Image (cartoon, rainbow, N blue to C red):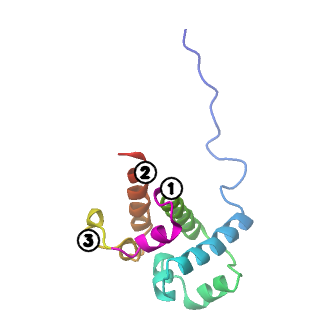
């Protein structure tokens, strides 16, 4: 006999990401961009056109308020980092991968794709890595 499963709330009681978690991700992404050897301009483009002064504050450890768009970008970047760590046992190879042309990305490097500035560009790289490590 079929039994109805209890329904979950559509709106969780707590926010998906706390301020402390968002700040920690911002600090991690700044360090990740250093490993990727990105210029400030490249990093700001990937973060959706973040202002130079704001990014300078991030680099000094003061990310300030992080809105939903930035939190989504940070989450995607952490997923990209995780995917690279799974695919490459040598972290340096994973860090270098983001600047190498990739036929699956139309001959562009992942950084070039992510610099398009849209969340969809970040998601495209993230999904590619997820597919590479887990199959389509």
- Depth check: give the residue in front, 26 or 98: 98
In magenta segment, residue 133: no
Q: From what the image shows, is residue 125 above or below residue 7?
A: below
For marks 2 and 3, give the one nearer the viewer: 2
Q: Is residue 117 left or right of residue 51?
A: left
- Residue at the image point whose x is 71% and y is 81% from the top: 62
- Residue at the image point whose x is 60% and y is 91% from the top: 53
Q: Mark 2 sits on what residue?
A: 133
Residue 87 in the image: state x and y as whole percent.
Answer: 46, 57
| Residue contact between numbered discs 1 and 2, judged by CB atoms under 8 Å | yes
Instruction: Tell me the quarter of the image containing the C terminus.
Output: top left
- Asked if residue 15 can be seen in this view, the reply is yes
The picture quadrant where one finds residue 3 is top right
Q: CA distance from mark 3 to mark 1?
A: 23 Å
Q: Earlier in the sequence, mark 2 or mark 3?
A: 3
Q: Determine which of the numbered discs, if any, sits on residue 86 in the image.
A: 1
Which range of residues does the magenta coloring cover?
Answer: 86-100
Q: Determine which of the numbered discs, if any, sits on residue 107 in the image.
A: 3
């Amino acid at each position: 006999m079929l039994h109805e499963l209890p329904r979950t709330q559509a709106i969780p009681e707590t926010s998906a990401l706390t301020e402390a978690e968002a700040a920690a991700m911002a600090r991690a992404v700044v360090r990740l961009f250093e490993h990727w050897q990105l210029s400030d301009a490249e990093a700001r483009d990937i973060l959706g056109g973040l202002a130079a002064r704001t990014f300078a504050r991030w680099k000094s450890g003061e990310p300030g308020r992080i809105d939903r768009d930035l939190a989504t970008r940070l989450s995607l970047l952490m997923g990209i980092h995780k995917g690279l760590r799974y695919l490459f046992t040598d972290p340096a190879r994973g860090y270098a991968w983001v600047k190498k042309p990739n036929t699956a990305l139309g001959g562009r490097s992942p950084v070039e794709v992510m610099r398009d500035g849209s969340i969809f560009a970040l998601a495209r790289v993230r999904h590619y890595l997820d597919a590479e490590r887990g199959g389509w």
